[in-house]
Image (cartoon, helix red, strand yellow):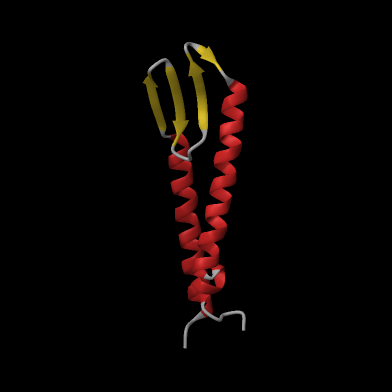
Amino acid sequence: MTNPLRQLGELKKMRDQAMQIQRTLKNERIELDEGGIKIVLNGQQEILELEIDGEKNDKLKDKLNKALKTSQEIAAKKLQQMSGGLQGLLGNLGQ
């Protein structure tokens, strides 16, 4: 028989680790400057700066960030469906 409290503790530990990774990724900076296009993004795939031929383009940056966020949300939903969500992690704890 599995211990539900231990499973909850393990889930909390995994959540804490995921949050730490998110904080670390948010502080990462990736820069690409080629062919008149400069892009700066963080490790969470958020575009921080976008310049084309030395001109900032905040409108395009915002639209790209919106598209990336939508894509990430779709991917997260697909992963949740594949893994069975929390029920997959905890077994049949709630039943």
Question: Would residue 94 appear left or right of 91 to someone viewing this image?
Answer: right
The quadrant in which residue 78 appears is bottom right
Above or below — where is 84 with respect to 14?
A: below
Above or below — where is 57 with respect to 71?
A: above
Q: Residue at x 51, y 23 (%)?
A: 49
Q: Residue at x 48, y 11 (%)?
A: 54
Q: Residue furthest bottom?
A: 1
Above or below — where is 66 with respect to 54?
A: below
Name the quarter where the C terminus is drawn. bottom right
Q: Nearer the viewer, residue 9 or 39?
A: 39
Q: Residue at x 44, y 47 (%)?
A: 21
Q: Nearer the viewer, residue 49 or 8?
A: 49
Q: Nearer the viewer, residue 61 or 6?
A: 61
The quadrant in which residue 62 appears is top right
Residue 70 percent location from the top left of the image:
59, 45
Residue 83 percent location from the top left of the image:
49, 68
Q: Residue at x 38, y 20 (%)?
A: 33
Residue 59 percent location from the top left of the image:
62, 23
> How many numbered dots are placed on residues in this image?
0
